[in-house]
Image (cartoon, helix red, strand yellow):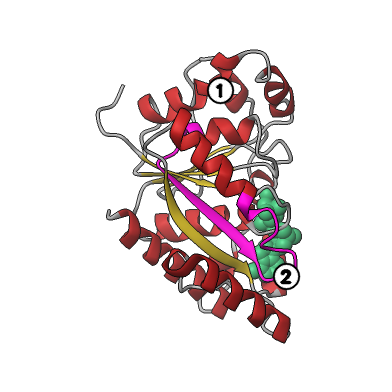
Amino acid sequence: MKNQKPLVIVVANQKGGVGKSTICQNLGYCLSHNKINTSIIDLDPQGNTTKSYPIKTSDEIIRMFEGESIDQIKINDSSLSLLPSHKSLAVVANKMTTDYNLLFKLRDYVNNYCDTQIILIDTPPTLIGLTVSAFASASHLLIPISSTFYSTHGVNDLLETFEMIKERLNPELKLLGFCVSIFDTRTSLSEEVVKEIQSSFGDLVFDSIIPKTVKVEEAQSSLMSVCEMYPSSKVSKSYFSLSEEIIKRVEI
Ligand SMILES: Nc1ncnc2c1ncn2[C@@H]1O[C@H](COP(=O)(O)OP(=O)(O)O)[C@@H](O)[C@H]1O
Ligand SMILES: [Mg+2]
């Protein structure tokens, strides 16, 4: 058991393909690069974050939901560790609809047994089950948002879920901010959308905007984060500055 409450950032948006997993992967790299002990919990049964690391499959996350003591996987001797996804997480999600104790297993784990300074939780594209359990466990919510026409649709539902969880399950949950996570610099529509996001959410929108580039997928297909593979590229610099903005907002 440990004493200090961890900083737990849940990365969520019920839309798929908005850059949740890629943000977790790159923030994990940037924070650990700055010598901040960081762990990533991949709560999405699809396991896209997990698939971007050269590791073997493991059922530790399922055993965590069974209340067993577990180990995370160290990444490259760095300050980063991962609790990988497992396909049976989908079964856990189904069981959560009838077994409410399961909703709080993750909270017990992060509060009592996960010994890193920052924990990033990647979530599936839904606002129920596993995502609720992540909201119940977290101190902060980070919302990635892309710059496409429909990107802001559904944000109200997400914010309603945030308020409901804050009221009923986790009063400590704070809205860390919105990050424009896939910004297509070639279209003027993208710029319009970003302006709309900034006028709707004001200071909650991070100044660091992540540009859209094929380098991201190129790196992921080589089982690396873009920040590791192309550290001086524009996109990597944006992830690094996002991580610095986050550190300022959470005051560590
Ligand atoms: N900044 C970016 N530029 C280009 N492609 C990106 C960027 N961020 C994410 N992607 C790609 O977009 C797709 C969806 O991203 P992902 O992080 O998996 O989203 P989510 O977890 O929200 O479903 C992936 O193929 C990923 O490689
Ligand atoms: Mg994902």
Name the quadrant of the N terminus.
top left
10 Å crowding of disc 2: few (<14), some (14-19), many (20+): some
Q: Nearer the viewer, residue 241 or 147?
A: 147
Taking the magenta stretch, the answer to whether it contains residue 151 is yes
Q: Nearer the viewer, residue 61 or 133?
A: 133
Taking the magenta stretch, the answer to whether it contains residue 110 is no
Picture residue at 27% right of the left edge, 53% below the top: 252
In percent of width and height, residue 219 lies at 66, 65
- From the viewer's perspective, is 113 left or right of 168? left
In percent of width and height, residue 131 lies at 60, 36
Picture residue at 55% right of the left edge, 30% below the top: 133
**Magenta stretch?**
136-156
In percent of width and height, residue 91 lies at 73, 22
Q: Quadrant of residue 242?
A: bottom left
In percent of width and height, residue 73 lies at 52, 37
Figure check: 6 above or below 142: above
- From the viewer's perspective, is 88 left or right of 170? right
Q: Nearer the viewer, residue 163 or 209?
A: 163
Residue type at mark 1?
Answer: Leu
Residue type at mark 2?
Answer: Thr
SS of the residue under disc 2: loop
Which label number is shown at residue 148?
2
SS of the residue under disc 1: helix
Figure check: 121 above or below 228: above
